[in-house]
Each structure stands twice: as structure tokens, then as C-alpha cells.
Image (cartoon, rainbow, N blue to C red):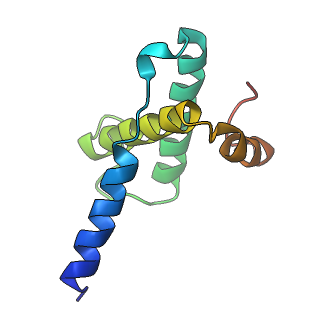
Amino acid sequence: MENPKQVTSSLTGYDAIYNLVPNEEHIQPADDSKYKKTALALVLCLLNSQFFPPEVSSLEDTDVVYVASLLLRHIRQLICNAHAKHIWNPLLNMGVVPPL
């Protein structure tokens, strides 16, 4: 069993990441469409890799939608917080995301 202090610490650390500003209102629609497609591609990879339990097999499952929304939020945060180039280029080289 995990140490409760470690769990709390890790949750607090994620809260700091989750609460970074995504500035989605400033993202151009064409760019946001690419980010949405990237989040969809990533969640499809998770579905195909059996990341989710066997009973979860659809993009309409609430767990899948939740994970896809988190991925999109974090992609937007990376763009907004100037981390995109460091993340996007390796994903582009692996063929995971489309060219900008």
C-alpha cells in the first residue's frame, strides 16, 4: 500500500499541472482543430494498447471522453506555456501528430 503522504503529494503536484492556464479562448480554430485531432489520436492509441479495462472499448465511454478531454487540455497548456516545440517535434517524428 502506498504511503498516504506520497499520494497526497502526487495529487498536489498534478493539481499544479492541471491548473496551468490553457488560454483556449486565444487559440485559432484551425490550430485547435489540430490539437483536437491529436488528442483523439492519442486516446485511440490508448484504446488500442489496452490502457483501459476490457469493458471500455468505445470512444463514447465516459472514461475515454474524460481522458481525451484531459489530453486536449494538456496539449493546449503546452502550446500556451511555450512547451509545444519540445513536445511536438518528438511526437511528429514518431508519426503520432500531424505536421503544423
Residue 40 visible to an observer of this rendering: no
Q: Quadrant of residue 14?
A: bottom left
Image position of 71 with respect to 28: above or below? below
In this rendered view, identify the residue nearer to me: 72 or 57. 72
Residue at the (43%, 60%) spot, across then down: 51
In this rendered view, identify the residue nearer to me: 30 or 46. 30
Residue 48 visible to an observer of this rendering: yes
Residue 43: x and y, percent? Answer: 47, 43
Residue furthest to the left:
4
- Quadrant for the N terminus, please: bottom left
Q: Is residue 26 left or right of residue 8?
A: right
Image position of 4 with respect to 28: above or below? below
Residue at the (45%, 34%) spot, across then down: 72
Residue 76: x and y, percent? Answer: 50, 31
Residue furthest to the top:
29
Residue 7: x and y, percent? Answer: 26, 74
Q: Is residue 12 left or right of residue 86?
A: left
